[in-house]
Amino acid sequence: MDELKKIVSSSDNIVFFGGAGVSTESGIPDFRSSNGLFNEKYRFPPETMLSYDFFKSNMAEFYEFYINKMIHLDAKPNKAHIKLAELEAAGKLKAIITQNIDGLHQMAGSKNVLELHGSVHRNNCMSCGNTYNVDVLLKENRIPLCTCGKVIKPDVVLYGEGLDSDILDEAVRFISDADVLIIGGTSLNVYPAAGLINYYKGNKLVLINKSATSFDGRADLVINESIGQVLDDL
Ligand code: ZN
């Protein structure tokens, strides 16, 4: 912790890269973890039900799963979200790059949030491009339709879909320029996390995760603890 405090206090160019572990501490289940959605009784595993093919071919079932399992409007930012927003406001943190789609960083007050996998809070008509907030899904409780009559799709990257190249480019730029890169709440097994880290050129790579990751050997500092607890102790 002393080492981390030193690193953070001496930098004004920190970038944070966060995974599902940042959100699980707000009560949002990680569907990839063993006690997450993976074990639940659905017709297919989440990776199938959250794929673009399934969205196209089984739209009503997709929305039933998506609305029940992926939207957590009661969740509140935890200590990790709050500390990161404070570091940004203090001019120390330049960007948050997240794999989460829940919008909790923005709710905590963070401004520069790069959402690699999109956000449940944005939904777009697939035909005319009209945008809707998440309420449009909750009201309908079936396939949500635009006023133009066409289907509204969540602005969330489904399995089988590519990432937004502008957001990816921006993430690469922030990581390349970062003095400190803090990676938290991810085992780094999910694309494109591992690839993005390769763009970091500094010597202050900090990994904070409850369990060991395959990248621990490359990190300058590893803390196997809850991300919320560690950031709150800063
Ligand atoms: Zn439309």
Image (cartoon, rainbow, N blue to C red):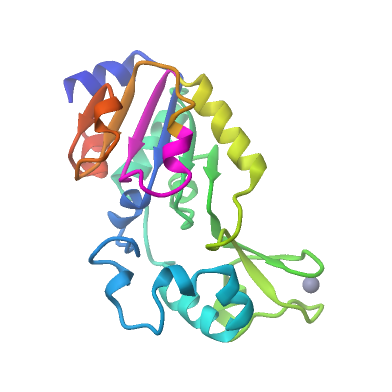
Is residue 13 rendered to the left or right of residue 154? left
**Residue at image coords 47%, 23%:** 91
Residue 62 sits inside the magenta stretch: no
Q: Quadrant of ligand 1?
A: bottom right
Range of residues picked out in magenta: 179-196
**Residue at image coords 45%, 47%:** 105
Asked if 73 appears above or below 110 in the picture, the reply is below
**Residue at image coords 24%, 64%:** 34
Is residue 37 rendered to the left or right of residue 164? left
49, 139: nearer the viewer: 49
From the top left corner, tell me how far across and down residue 225 is, in percent. 18, 41
From the top left corner, tell me how far across and down residue 94 is, in percent. 50, 27
210, 214: nearer the viewer: 214
Quarter location, residue 129: bottom right
Image quarter where the C terminus lies is top left
From the top left corner, tell me how far across and down residue 170 is, in percent. 60, 34
162, 76: nearer the viewer: 162
Asked if 10 appears above or below 226 in the picture, the reply is above
Quarter location, residue 205: top left
